[in-house]
Amino acid sequence: MKVHRIASVPFILVVVCMLAAPGAFAEESTGLTRDVLKTLQSSVKLDAQTRALMNAITNNDVRSLALNRELYNRHDDIFNYKIDVKGITDQASSGRCWLFAGLNIMRPSVMKKFNLSSFEFSENYLFFWDKLEKANMFLEAVIDTRGRDLDDRELQVLIKDPVPDGGWWTYVVALIDKYGAVPKEIMPETNNSKSTGMMNAFLSRLMRHDAVELRAMAAKGAKMPGLEARKVEMLKDVYRLLVLHLGMPPQEFVYRYEDKDNKVHETKYTPQSFFNDAVGVNLADYVSIFDYAAKPYSKYYVFKYDRNMADIPDQDFINMKIQDVKGYVLKAMLAGEPVWFAADAGPENDRKDGLLEIGMYDYNSLLGVNMDLTKAERILYFESNANHAMVFVGADTLGGKAAKWRVENSWGSEVGAKGYWTMYDDWFDQYVYMVILNKKYLPESVLAILATKPEVLPAWDPMRELFR
């Protein structure tokens, strides 16, 4: 009797081949097949109009081609109400807009107090302390998460940008409350405060180096007292780097100035006593209001790990439709108070003349494609965010409502209308995400939301993550 055997090796090879090519059994290919490519190629015909567009777009700046001439021509920068501010500030190549805007809203009161024709706070002074506090905050977060894997999502957010330039209004409040403020001439700008890239690279590398060490210490069984003591030693290196790049912050100083009546004054201050004397405003009375269109309104929220100091609460906010907030903003300005706000400064922005208006650039018509998204969709899909802070300093009103808003920017006087922007009301609706208002301008029904338990949003939330 003859026994027939099936060779095992060829059988295995057949099985391997079958497993290696699962697409062979797919009903349709998901790749760009030749048929699909032919369909795409035939969808665009180089007719006279398309050829002219291709020639124009390949040889020009698309923004200049898409500029809506009708909107541009009917623009004016006339405002029937302006807050008296003088002098445009310049954050230069840094992410300090939040700090510039925060200090800018206080400048008018200082000029009035000291009878000055102009005044500017030292942004560099508070920037120094902000960087130091953020370094401490980062190292504390590393200690707090020391038992987690490196692929932990919160830990990755922290390590990605350990000591960022960016911040919120609450950062300004915390810094001034602890460190006070000084005039610009007491601690002026340096090359590295105006262009922060290299300094930030050093700080980030140092923080990551220190994070490796702290996590290694914890893995070997180090307890909290040892980790905290080592952290303080690490912060000495941070302080040294900041002094070398930004200068030494003063503990006390003499403020000598000449007022508008040509009288010379000289007073000795600490940074804390100067702020109390020059401004004397309780910054804790101001409330953060967001238009986070992707979240339910009339609710209280807080961002996880969103603060510049280890020992203060995270950034919190009341969520409201921006259309409902504009009346409170106008009320504050008509009372003579500039208003800090955060917006997406990129879209529909004519930097040359300082115009912010929906439809300023008609890309859809020029390119022949539809790229429209809702405000909520732009947030959730990382298309738009509160990436720049500025100040409302005027309005052009009609029937008790503002048709357009005057904006003080911190990009210097060479752009915009000598540093100012005109924001039309429809742009306000779509791209303003946050405003800061004194409690006295808000109704009790809104303030009552602050007494509710906040919903905690994660460290990687799209509204929080980009403003860094």
Image: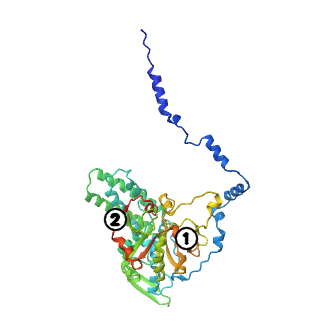
As drawn, the residue found furthest toward the right would be 48
Residue 107 drawn above or below residue 303: below
As drawn, the residue found furthest toward the top would be 1
The x, y position of residue 418, in whole percent, is 58, 76
Colouring of the image: rainbow
Mark 2 surroundings within 10 Å by alpha-carbon count, few (fewer than 14), some (14 through 19), many (20 or more): some
Q: Which residue is mark 1?
A: 426
Residue 418 drawn above or below residue 300: below
- The answer to whether residue 413 is seen in the rendering is yes
Q: Is residue 78 left or right of residue 147?
A: right
The x, y position of residue 207, in whole percent, is 39, 58
The x, y position of residue 170, in whole percent, is 39, 70
Residue 372 drawn above or below residue 78: above
Image quadrant for the C terminus? bottom left
Q: Which quadrant of the view contains residue 372?
A: bottom right
Q: Is residue 118 left or right of residue 317?
A: right
**Please, what is the three-letter code of the amino acid marked with disc 1?**
Asp
Q: What residue lies at 34% left-to-right and 57% top-to-bottom?
A: 142
Q: Which quadrant of the view contains residue 211?
A: bottom left
CA–CA distance in space, label 1 to label 2: 39 Å
The x, y position of residue 417, in whole percent, is 59, 75
Q: What residue lies at 61% left-to-right and 72% top-to-bottom?
A: 353
Identify the secondary structure beneath mark 1.
helix
Q: Which residue is mark 2?
A: 310
